[in-house]
Image (tube, rainbow, N blue to C red):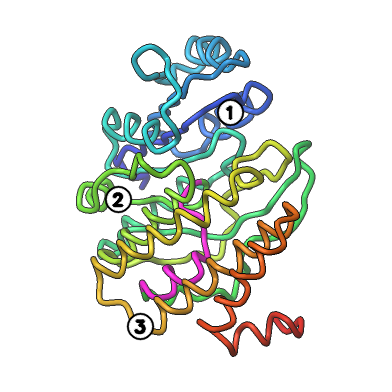
Amino acid sequence: MESQGIVSVVIPAFNRVNFIDQTVTSVVSQSYSYVETIVVDDGSTDGTWERLDDLRQKHGIKVLTHEGRENRGQSAALNLGLQEAIGEYIAILDSDDLFAPGKLKKQVRFLEENPTVGLVYGMGQAIDGDGQYLYDILCPDHLEPNDPNEVLLDCYFLLPQNALVRRSVFDRVGEFEESFRAAQDHDMLIRIAEVTTMAFIPETLFYYRRHGDSISSNGQELRWRNGFEILRRAAKRYPYRRSTIRKRAAVLNYRLWETYSGQGQRGRAWSHLIWAGLLDPARSVRVLLGWE
């Protein structure tokens, strides 16, 4: 029998007029009947706001925006959506990505059958701007370790697009950090992993769009620099292994080396590569040898 629990899907949107129709359609066409769709426009200037009014009339979705339609960042948009959400379960979807058919029904069923689990996720596929397949995200033999150290170190699955989370978990961990204009999803996932049990189901649940204007393609320096503040807060908040803290710092330095190398800032880049090597020599050697 289908659960009566409402799923609130929160979609933060900024300048996504070319993709927002497909994104919203992937939600409203879900086979699960009890879905509340909330789109929060974050001050779009490309026609997204006007298009959302059409989608509101067509599908009955909720459309929100900040006072004065100002751009306040994805965290603020998500927090506004969460404040308005009434669902027992929360799903977040970036405004250029898609839910796979049947996603919500499968995940709600799992949470109903496993009351001690607070978050469930699955597999996905990366697609390009035209919706063409690029690569798989996770595989059927993936195992969820339920160790916050692993989430902090590698952030091996996506909170947006993929996960379904009990509202009670968000109530426990608090809102998204609005001072972060990048990496706020990793920060939230770390905080969730610290307080609840997570589970994986070997089902394709989402499509993650990779294109030149995607958030994941922009602001990499800010993302990795925010990572150091996220790491500092995590170490203060939870008893992580010292080796995890050290290895995560190595990863962040390595990513900044990649970022600055791509920008042609060689001197700045090499200082981060040296730090990465000092913090995690074994992994650095594996990476340089092409073993990882």
Q: Furthest-bottom residue in view?
A: 282
Which residue is pictured at 44% across the width and 33% down the height? 73
Q: Secondary structure at mark 1?
A: helix
Residue shown at 27%/48% (left/top)?
A: 170
Q: Secondary structure at mark 2?
A: strand
Q: Find the residue positioned furthest to the front.
A: 267
**Disc sitting over residue 166 in the figure:** 2
Q: Secondary structure at mark 3?
A: helix
Question: Can you say whether 227 is above or below 283 in the image?
Answer: above
Instruction: Using a 10 Å C-alpha cutoff, classify the residue at mark 1 as few (fewer than 14 neighbours), some (14 to 19) or many (20 or more).
Output: some
Q: Which residue is mark 1?
A: 25
The region drawn magenta spans: 148-160
The residue beneath circle 3 is: 242
Quarter of the view holding residue 275: bottom right
Q: Are marks 1 and 3 in contact (CB under 8 Å)?
A: no
Q: Residues within 10 Å of mark 3 (few under 14, many from 20)?
A: few
* 223 relative position to 6: left or right: right
Q: Closer to the camera, 215 or 108?
A: 215
The quadrant in which residue 138 appears is bottom right
Residue at the spot x=41%, y=66% of the render?
199
Please, what is the three-letter code of the amino acid marked with disc 3?
Arg
Indicate the position of residue 117 as horizontal and vertical percent values: 31, 63
Residue drawn at x 28%, y 64% as measured from the top left: 196
Coordinates of residue 103 in the picture (x, y in percent): 52, 47
Q: Residue 244 in magenta?
A: no
Q: Position of residue 229 (x, y in %)?
A: 38, 58
